[in-house]
Image (cartoon, helix red, strand yellow):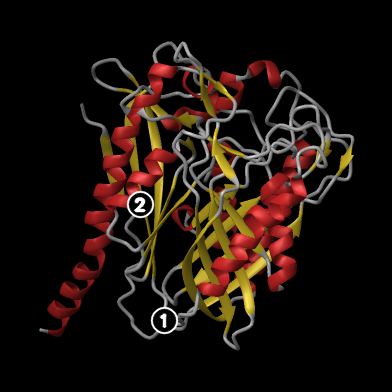
Amino acid sequence: MLWLLFVLCSLSSNSVSGAEFRAAVVKIDITPDDFQNLLGYGARKSTGVHDRIFHKIVALDDGSTQFFLISSDICLFSPSEYDRVVAQLKKQMGIKPVNVWWTVTHTHSAPEIGPPGMYGIYLGDRVQHVVDAKYTAMAEQKLIDGVREARQKLAPARLGVGWGFSQANINRRAIDVEGKASLGLNPDGPVDRRIGLLRLEKADGSPLALIANYPIHGTVLGGTSLVISGDAPGIVSEYVEQKVGAPVLFINGAAGNLAPIYSVYPSPQAGHLSQFKVLLGNRILEANQKITNMNDEVKLRAGALTVETPRKPGLGWPSDLGSYTNTNKEGTNMVLLPIRFLKINEEVAIWSAPLELFCEVSNEVRDRSSFPYTFYFGYSNGWLGYLPTEAEWEYGGYEVERVSPFTPQAAKQLTESVVNYMQGEMRDQKSNRFRILKRKKN
């Protein structure tokens, strides 16, 4: 079976050395001023605001490539929503979509944005109402304006990278005596508790931004809570921002089977929401203090591939996602799964996908990577659903039976595709560039 469809977009060869690295950050409030339908549980409408929600945008420029990372305090959105926004960014500012990653913190206490996409296929009973077009338009315009502002603010900067550790999450696939999985807590299940951290400083050494990558569902607050909130990711980000004096982009990881250790409580107080400042916020601060090597010589390289993998038999497909599926010559319906990559110098490899990925997959990719810092940015550029490991299919449960478009072999196909790209295309970029320069010199 042809499961690796194509590799493309190895962009922006930085053949000119010595270019000045620049960066900028913008933080924009997207808290609604009215009551909104909240996404993530059953249909429900907000009655107030516990804490405000934001777009946070980082722009990076190495003199050859401009790259934009957006983290939004919302639950999820369809890939067609991403396509619509990046089409505007390309039209208005000439920014290539491969150089724009739009991620979400995955809070379940924020308004809906855009068409339901796959969410409407899996959980159509939750989206019988019309999504608020006014709020969607506001969020889109603020994102576009924020990218423009970040581009205008680019200034000399330095970048550092490090690791941290937090026990704020736990496996949520509870297995009963019959071998059946349900949503709960499983202290014996697979987990990923690493914090991946990127720090940006201004040229004078003052803080510019932190990019904190950690896998955790935004579900401290449960379905009976009706207040708008960034949940644990938002609370932690605001706390760390106050401590470091700069915006924090929270980037969720492979949280498909990982919950916060306090989950689905009816109120912030009952869910110990503020305790995540200690459980995760202080761990981010500790990791930040350990970063001592800041670099003003930074090279960026963005890339992409698409993995073609069989679609779950009998699964419907939304009309807005026609470019994310096809039918092969054998008549099998396929999912076209877009994967993005960002290489920073020779040390950092970041990959992203529009998935709720099980942590075992990102753990294996990281373990097999030759890059000392390998991060997975989940919920990026849309949401196609959950991707469980093959071993988890025998236990069934919500993630396998209800909200995944994939078949059991998808996790292995994805893992091998990503590892091969990292060890091949991403590693070859440097040597290929040197060969080109050598030929020009000769």
- The picture quadrant where one finds residue 387 is top left
Q: Quadrant of the N terminus?
A: top left
Residue 313 position in % (x across, y down) = 39, 13
Instruction: Spot the residue most to the bottom.
Output: 204
User: Is residue 141 in sight in this rendering?
Assistant: no
Q: Which residue is mark 2?
A: 366
- Quote the CA–CA distance across marks 1 and 2: 25 Å
**What residue is at 75 percent from the left and 25 percent from the top?**
130
**What residue is at 83 percent from the left and 33 percent from the top?**
226
Say above or below: 55 vs 363.
Answer: below
* Nearer to us in this view, 324 or 106: 106
Neighbor class of circle 2 (other Cα within 10 Å; few <14, some 14-19, many 20+) is: some
* Nearer to us in this view, 324 or 277: 277
Amino acid type, callout 1: Glu
Q: Quadrant of the C terminus?
A: bottom left
Say above or below: 24 vs 72.
Answer: below
Q: How many marks?
A: 2
Asked if the residue at tag 2 contacts the one at tag 1, i.e. Cβ–Cβ closer than 8 Å, the answer is no
Neighbor class of circle 1 (other Cα within 10 Å; few <14, some 14-19, many 20+) is: some
> In the displayed structure, does residue 285 sit left or right of residue 43?
left
**What residue is at 57 percent from the left and 43 percent from the top?**
169
Q: Nearer the viewer, mark 1 or mark 2?
A: 2
- The picture quadrant where one finds residue 281 is bottom right
Label 2 SS = helix
- The picture quadrant where one finds residue 314 is top left
* Nearer to us in this view, 167 or 338: 167
User: Is residue 208 in sight in this rendering?
Assistant: yes
> In the displayed structure, does residue 91 sit left or right of residue 268?
left
Residue 16 position in % (x across, y down) = 33, 81
The numbered mark at residue 297 is: 1
> In the displayed structure, does residue 378 sit left or right of residue 346?
right
